[in-house]
Image (cartoon, rainbow, N blue to C red):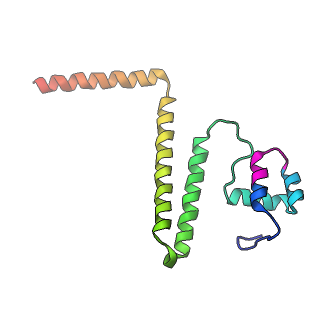
Amino acid sequence: MDDTEEEPSVDWAAVRAEYETGEETLAVIAVRHGITTSALSWRAKKQLWLSRYRTGNVDRPQIIKRMFRVLELQVLALEGNMEKTGEKEVAVLGKLASTLEKLIDIDNAATAAAKPKAQRKDIEELRNKLARRIAQLKRV
């Protein structure tokens, strides 16, 4: 199946809802909707459906990767149809880029907070030492 093929009898919204709950196997969902498991898996990956295996923990690198993918898909869609690109599409792209930037900032902050306390203490001591040295130089 390629991007242009559609199966008119398949209610993909219902398939997605069942997929994202994770209560049934892919095989059961596929049989219920008359599709193959590979078609189901392909669409879930292509359309970035939520993972069936959420643990409650946030996987920031995975979210950032998905946001890059969403931006990439949006840019490709805009490139493919430049004459119909309007302010609405550009605004959506801007919001996506802004969200991605915020996610990266959050990930960087969380990574910094996860550094060992000894390392953070060393950095703080170095900062204080530099501040004292700068103050001494100002007096001279």
Q: Is residue 91 left or right of residue 73?
A: left
Q: Position of residue 6 (x, y in %)?
A: 76, 71
Residue shown at 49%/50% (left/top)? 99
Read off the magenta span.
17-25
Nearest the viewer among 21 and 60 is 21
Residue shown at 78%/45% (left/top)? 22
Q: Is residue 24 magenta?
A: yes
Which residue reaches farthest left?
Answer: 140
Q: Is residue 9 above or below residue 37?
A: below
Q: Is residue 94 left or right of residue 23?
A: left
| Quadrant of the rendering where the C terminus is positioned | top left
Q: Is residue 83 left or right of residue 14?
A: left
Residue shown at 33%/24% (left/top)? 126
Q: Position of residue 107 (x, y in %)?
A: 51, 40
Q: Position of residue 130 (x, y in %)?
A: 26, 26
Which residue reaches farthest bottom?
Answer: 83
Q: Is residue 97 magenta?
A: no
